[in-house]
Image (spheres, rainbow, N blue to C red):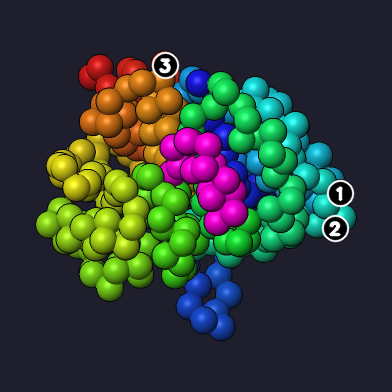
Amino acid sequence: MTVYVLGSLNIDLVSTVERMPNPGETVSGTSFKTYIGGKGLNQAVGCSRAGAKVIMLGAVGDDGYGKELIDALAADDISDKYISHKTGASGVAVIETDATGQNRIVVIPGANGQLTPGDIPEEVFKDSSAKYLIAQLETPITTVTDVFRRAKAVGFITALNPAPAQKLSAELLSYVDLFTPNQFEAELLTGIKVTDQQSAIKAGQALLAQGVKQVIVTLGEDGAMFVSHDENFHQPAFTVTVVDTTGAGDTFCGGLIAKLSEGMNMKDAIRYATAAAGLSTTKAGAVPSIPRSNEVAQLLNK
């Protein structure tokens, strides 16, 4: 089955430091690198490397970065036939990563912020080979809402990763089948501080009450918690040596939807996604760190 990914395409400008600077402080960095990124593109790559056929819905600028982003889609066999080309700059993310693998990210939307409902043609929703649509919140929320409305009208299964965290309308939430916040996003949307499995369940139940159908709260080194009206279960994280956590959540989402689109059950799909996310933290960068299915299989079989 084809998976559509609606979302951002960015160039990531990554500085590595021993520790994060305090306000007004200058620190020396240890390296600087440029990577392909953006939550939408990351999830599309994660989905493709997990074995799915992927079509990207998004926008790039007419700058040099725009060409790099289109080339990156091609490198992972992701279709760019519905990518909108805008006048001006492509999206950029400025990322600081410290010696512990933690990061701080500033995103400048560029062309991502110009993506409109009109950029997504009706033929997308007539694709009989497609069943799943993923999105995040680095493109305008009005566009995400409109696309989800149209997708649900024709029977797509929708998955929303609510990052960057922000308040969401009841309308948008009503169109969401699978909701994948991390613990901080879950807290923002529910007011429930997520510190363990029980609080993750409470936050998940609060999100179900807001209208989504199923929730997976990702918990970093504590794995993930699935919450639905019928069952709850916890998936532990896999033990890995963390280098850089950038893109781990996106790797989780992409791998999860790829495996669900293959017909895998939810428990096994979450186990796969958790392993893929863990592996992604063992390398620097977002897209470069996303593992392929054979690599994930090795970890799953240990």
Residue 270, placed above or below residue 62: above
Q: Earlier in the sequence, mark 1 or mark 3?
A: 1
Q: Earlier in the sequence, mark 3 or mark 2?
A: 2
Q: Amino acid at mark 2?
A: Gly
Q: Is residue 108 left or right of residue 65?
A: left
Residue 205 position by quadrant? bottom left
Q: Between 59 and 169, which is closer to the camera in this rendering?
A: 169
Q: Which residue: 49% across, 29% down?
A: 131
Give the foreground label among 1 and 3: 1
Task: Identify the mark at residue 62; answer none if there is no mark.
Answer: 1
Q: Provide the secondary structure element on which disc 1 rests.
A: loop
Q: Which residues are magenta?
A: 145-159
**Where in the figure is residue 161, as x and y percent of width and height?**
44, 50
CA separation in Å, label 3 and label 2: 39 Å
Residue 14 in sight from this viewpoint: no
Pointer 2 residue: 88
Pointer 3 residue: 294
CA separation in Å, label 1 and label 3: 36 Å
Circles 3, 2 touching at the beta carbon (< 8 Å):
no
Q: Which residue: 25% across, 17% down?
A: 301
**Where in the figure is residue 173, as x and y percent of width and height?**
41, 58
Q: Residue furthest bottom?
A: 24
Q: Is residue 196 left or right of residue 23?
A: left
